[in-house]
Image (cartoon, rainbow, N blue to C red):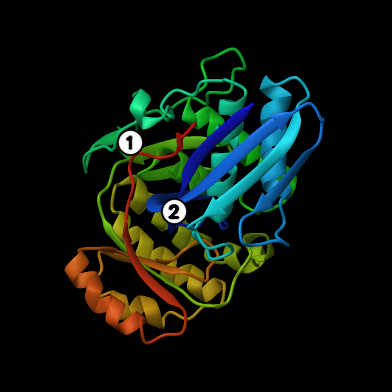
Amino acid sequence: MYGEAAALGAGTILNALSTGMGSAFAIDAETTARVELDDSGTVDGEIAGVPDADTRLIRRAVERVVERFGDGEGGHVRTESEVPMAAGLKSSSAAANATVLATLSALDVPVEGAEPRSAGGAEPRSAGGAESRSAGGAEPPAAADATDAPLDREAACRIGVEAARDAGVTVTVAFDDASASMLGGVTVTDNDADDLLAREAVEWDVLVWTPAARAFSADADVERCARVAPMARLVADLALDGRYGAAMTVNGLAFSAALEFPTEPAVEAMPHAAGVSLSGTGPSVVAVGDREELEQVCERWNQRTGDTWMTTTRTDGARVIE
């Protein structure tokens, strides 16, 4: 009973810590999970290259799937990631999503839209195509949580979110991050209700600066973030109106101040980027826009301590590999 799947990292448009509303976009950096199930009844896990890492989330993700679709199986889960941990780039969401899909594959539970590409799985969408927009007052899609309904990626994503709650690795429950990682493109969510309010395909070049320090989202100062709620509500309005670049920039300035990160990297990027923000609870900063313009930002960010790297958005989302 073996399954393998991959999910995406993501950058932030709106941090959900202030109001429960969040928005994120998928980037071309993957986490892969490999799950082997057996009759042991217990689950152990490992994260490649990090022997002392906390594996509660990926173990709980396997357990959640088995509780719903299995018969008491245990086993082993191993993740490998291009997404740096505790950097604000949604490594936990990517790990949870990949583990959920791999476990479902091991149990032969099909997930609509996550089939291997050779089997007709989801393909990238063209830029500008909206799958679910609510800025004009449309009703958000209903939650797909009925146990007898065909499983799709949104429902699978919610299993990973439940595992994150159980494991205590997030203070926002991170449905915004998880949905972007699982579905691709930009998503806007109500994390308090686990509602997907909007999803849109985008094609951006993305520049990421990740300093050497790490910041775990569960340690974020929620009280300080609550003080910037008026700005967060403005960012939500901008995101639901499709003004993602402006939303990112307002979010980045507000939450950098709230979480006590420097704003200088964002200021350096503003003349050249369509949008720039602190990603998650930091410490990474992400800028989006035209590659030639972002290369000018890259020259400035390369002078800072840490890693600077260029990538792109992804609109295809998570997928089963085997």
Q: Which residue lies furthest to the left in this view?
A: 292
Label 1: which secondary element: loop
Q: Can you say whether 312 is above or below 202 in the image?
A: below
Label 2: which secondary element: strand
Q: Do the residues labelled 2 and 1 touch (CB within 8 Å)?
A: no
Residue beneath the point at 33% across and 47% down: 314
Residue beneath the point at 47% across and 69% down: 284
| The quarter of the displayed image where residue 253 is located | bottom left
Q: Where is residue 235 in the image (x, y as percent from the top left)?
A: 40, 57
User: Nearer the N terminus, badge 2 or badge 1?
Assistant: 2
Q: Where is residue 207 in the image (x, y as percent from the top left)?
A: 33, 67
Q: Can you say whether 268 is above or below 46 in the image?
A: below
Judge from the rendering whether residue 275 lies leftward or rightward of residue 143; answer left or right: left
Q: Can you say whether 168 is above or below 104 in the image?
A: below
- The residue at which mark 1 appears reads as 133
> Front-most of 51 and 242?
51
Q: Which of marks 2 and 1 is in front?
A: 2
- The residue at which mark 2 appears reads as 10
Q: Can you say whether 207 is above or below 203 in the image?
A: below
Q: Which residue lies furthest to the bottom in this view?
A: 303
| The quarter of the displayed image where residue 12 is located | bottom left
Q: Where is residue 42 in the image (x, y as percent from the top left)?
A: 81, 35
Q: Which amino acid does label 2 sit on?
A: Ala
Q: How far apart are marks 2 and 1 (CA)?
A: 20 Å
* Disc 2 crowd, CA 10 A, few/some/many (<14, 14-19, 20+): many
